[in-house]
Amino acid sequence: MSSSIKGRGAQKKVHNRFFELGHEVLDEYLEFCQLDGEIADKNKTKYLEVFSKSFVNKVPSPDVGMGYSANPYQGCEHGCVYCYARNSHEYWGYGAGVDFERNILVKKNAPQLLEQKLRSKNWQGETIVLSGNTDCYQPIERKLEITRKCLKVMLKWKHPTGIITKNSLILRDLDILKEMAKLHIIAVNISVTSLSEKTRRLLEPRTASVKNRLKTIEILSKNNIPVNVMMAPIIPSLNSHEIIPIIKKVASLGAKSVAHTIVRLNGQNATIFEDWARKTIPDKADRILNQIAECHGGKLNDSQWGRRIKGDGIIAQQIADTSALARRKYMGNSKMPKLDISHYLELKNPQMHLF
């Protein structure tokens, strides 16, 4: 096994595609240190405040089951090597590899921007999902509490809210979530990619442990907060054999539903994932990479709508059939409830009840 960067998903820096044409970014100080024999890179995470003009984003992709998302952070310290959001870091001038995990942009003004959106006369109360790009409960949230402040705004306005996370830090905000659940305005999506802690540490080095993630599903469910489990992504020959055990386990903990996606290595992710596989699981790398390609028309890098989420071919169909079978066996007709928009609309326009 080649040497790897401990505690990181991506194992390399990759170029920013927007700087390919005649642009070069240099850091003469760091290069001087390296030439002089000093260790310039301490593998520390850096946080940079940005001042966004808007916070709620429309999601145009037909593949994603959300209309609007809101991300308090750009970049993600969780370091999930497969993360499709890595490429978005290039728009901020960073690379999709270790830069995505080490340089985190924070939006401290997010709660104020969110309230402005909810007050807008043109806003009709569509569900807003916290995350969608990067995890709203990544480690820095423990200190900054931007997500918690946003949830307070959502509760104040009784607005339909979704959350996507793989961090047990969400339990810190159980007090707010319980109040939202009483109004039927909250739905939580917890990502579970494996029941193996060894696999979790390789794939998602700075996320909550498997044990804590399962505990989170159980606690949320016991407090009547609906939970959908996302087996996202399923990676052939790496975690595809765990589909049935995962569904059986999360169903026993109270999850309302389970969905899956096939790993999609868009943009720079193909290079990042292949480099990671050859360094961390070299004996399985070729088989995994070949089977991923089989699910995406023979390519690792696949951005075709429809296929990029569920894949196609024999392997993708086997995964879909296994997931469907396990859901029928262990979850029956259970499904996520529809969120209630009426509270928000009435609060925004108190005269609505007259109609």
Image: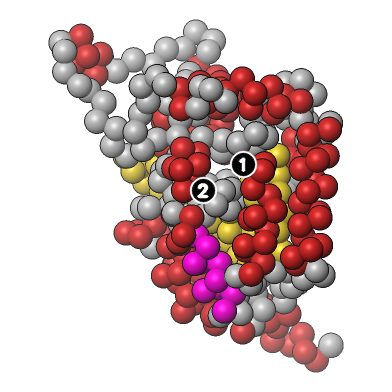
Q: Quadrant of residue 320?
A: top right
Above or below — where is 87 with respect to 271? below
- Left or right side of 165 for 289: right
Q: Does the magenta segment cover residue 215?
A: yes
Magenta region: 213-222
Pick whichever, 240 or 176, lies toward us.
240
For the question of whether residue 161 can be seen, the reply is: no
Q: Is residue 151 magenta?
A: no
- Left of 13 or right of it: where is 265? right
Q: Are marks 1 and 2 in contact (CB under 8 Å)?
A: yes
Q: Earlier in the sequence, mark 1 or mark 2?
A: 2
Q: Of the residues shown, which amino acid type is indicated by label 2?
A: Ser
Q: Residues within 10 Å of mark 2 (few under 14, many from 20)?
A: few
Which circle marks residue 196 in the picture?
2
Residue at image point 77% right, 70% down: 334
Residue drawn at x 22%, y 23% is 40
Say which quarter of the image contains residue 116.
bottom right
What residue would you read off at disc 1? 239
Q: Position of residue 166 (x, y in %)?
A: 52, 55
Whole-percent x and y of residue 119? 60, 69
Give the CA distance from mark 1 to mark 2: 9 Å
Where does the image place residue 316, in percent across and percent down from the top left? 79, 37
SS class of the residue under badge 2? loop
Q: Tell me the element at label 1.
A: loop
Look at 72% across and 76% down and name the residue there.
340
Nearer to me, 141 or 43: 43
